[in-house]
Image (tube, grey):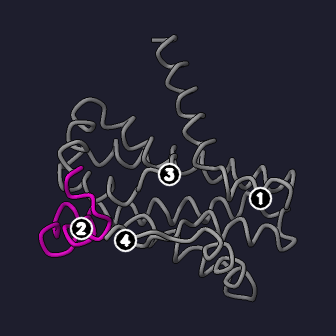
Amino acid sequence: MKKTVNKKGIKEWALAHAKGPFSTFWLALFSFAESSFFPIPPDAIMIAILLLKQQAKWIYYATITTVFSVAGGLFGYLIGFLFFEAVGGSIVSFYNLESHLATVASFFSNNAFFTIFLAAFTPIPYKVFTISAGLFKIDIFIFIIASILGRAIRFFAIAYFVKLYGKRIASVLYKYFNVVSIAVVIIIGVIIYLLV
C-alpha cells in the first residue's frame, strides 16, 4: 500500500512543533531525518517557525534546515553504501520505490550531479536518492556539492519569500511548492541547455 501524508496534518503538526523553546531542535532533527528515512518535509516546520514572528531570522533558520538536511543526506548515503541490505532496502520498500532503483541508476550514469541537485531541490523523494547514491557509489564530493546547492536554493528561497510576504505566501507554498519547484528546475534546465 502506498504511503501518503495529509497536507493539512503536516501543517498542524508543524505549527505545534514550531512553538516553544525547542523549535530549533525539532527543525534540525526533522531536517536530518527527512533526508534519510522520515516522510515529513522540513519546509513545513521552517515555514511555521518563520510565521511565528521570526521572519527577521530567515537566514538563520534556512541555514539550520540546509545544514542538517545535507547531514541527513550524508547519513542516507552511508546507509546505501554500507547498510543497504540491512536498512536501506527496507526504507526504499516503505516508499514502494524498489522498481525505480534501475531508473535512478540510469539517471546517475547520465549526470549524477544534476540528478542529485534535482532530488535535493524538487519534491522528488530526496531520501531515495541519498540512499541510492551510496548504493551506486556516486562520488561523495559530487554528492555533497549537489546536495548543498539543491537544498540551499530550496530552503533559502522558501524562507525569503515567507520573510517578504508572510502568511500570504505561506499558504501558496504549502499548496503549490511542488509545481513551482518543478517549473524552476525546467527553467534552469532550459538555461543550461541554451548556454552549453
* Element marked by disc 1: helix
Query: Callout 2: few (<14), some (14-19), or many (20+) C-alpha neighbours within 10 Å?
Result: few
Q: Label 2 sits on what residue type?
A: Ser
Q: Which residues are magenta?
A: 78-100
Q: Label 1 sits on what residue type?
A: Ala
Q: Is residue 40 above or below residue 99?
A: below
| Residue hosting label 3 | 123
**What's the magenta bit mostly, secondary-structure-wise?**
helix
In the rendered image, which quarter contains the C terminus?
A: top left
Structural distance between the alpha carbons of marks 2 and 4: 11 Å
Question: Which residue is found at the position 72% from the left and 65% from the top?
Answer: 47
* Element marked by disc 3: loop
Q: Label 4 sits on what residue type?
A: Phe
Q: Position of residue 175 (x, y in %)?
A: 67, 56
Question: Which residue is found at the position 58% from the left and 42% from the top?
Answer: 181
| Residue hosting label 2 | 93
Q: Are marks 1 and 4 in contact (CB under 8 Å)?
A: no
Structural distance between the alpha carbons of marks 1 and 2: 32 Å
